[in-house]
Amino acid sequence: MPITKGYQQLVAEAMAEVKTYSVSEVQARLSDANVQVVDIRDIRELNDGTVLGAFHAPRGMLEFWVDPASPYHKPIFADEGKEFILFCGAGWRSALAAKALQDMGMTNVAHIDGGWAEWVKQGAPTETLEQQKARRKPKA
């Protein structure tokens, strides 16, 4: 059976419905306590690093981690005072993911245009996984 709607159409429809930020717009808000950048890339994609301060929520688990009724719920997503800004490799998966979260009722979600590739291209701040772990480690 042939598909009736391809990925390009799905992404275009999602882009028309979700809030999209440029790299510079997100970069200017990195220190805002009310913003949480969320890396939805696959774990294998994280070897190159991530956005400074990002929380990793793999795309395949995102809806389960967001839903308080799910046994996989992550409390970070229950903070309605935060805006969750998603990113992936190129901005396609994050657009689809932001749309899915909007469909779940979230109004505090957006994504980064161009994703990780654009973030790196523009020289925005990144950190390695080791740096991220050290930053998150509780101070003794």
Image (cartoon, rainbow, N blue to C red):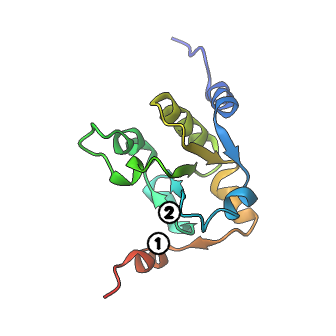
Residue 132 x/y as whole percent:
46, 74
Mark 2 secondary-structure assignment:
helix
Mark 1 secondary-structure assignment:
helix
> Disc 1 designates what residue?
129
> Disc 2 designates what residue?
46
- Residue at the extreme front of the image, as rendered: 81
> Mark 1 near mark 2, Cβ–Cβ under 8 Å?
yes
- 88 up-or-down from 1: above or below: below
- 33 up-or-down from 79: above or below: below
Q: Is residue 66 left or right of residue 23?
A: left
Three-letter code for the amino acid on which mark 2 is drawn? Leu
How far apart, in angstroms, are the residues tagged by discs 1 and 2? 7 Å
- Residue at the extreme top of the image, as rendered: 1
Write the residue at 33% across / 51% down. 74
The image quadrant where one finds the C terminus is bottom left
- 139 up-or-down from 83: above or below: below
Residue 92 x/y as whole percent:
62, 41
- The one nearer the camera, 97 or 139, is 139
State the image quarter where residue 49 is shown.
bottom right
Q: Earlier in the sequence, mark 1 or mark 2?
A: 2
Three-letter code for the amino acid on which mark 1 is drawn? Leu
Badge 2 density bin: few <14, some 14–19, many ≥20, Cα 10 Å: some
Residue 98 x/y as whole percent:
55, 39
- The one nearer the camera, 22 or 32, is 32
State the image quarter where residue 121 is shown.
bottom right
Badge 1 density bin: few <14, some 14–19, many ≥20, Cα 10 Å: some
- Residue at the extreme left of the image, as rendered: 71
Write the residue at 40% across / 38% down. 63
Residue 96: mark = none
Write the residue at 51% across / 54% down. 38
Write the residue at 62% across / 27% down. 10
Q: Is residue 139 left or right of residue 40?
A: left
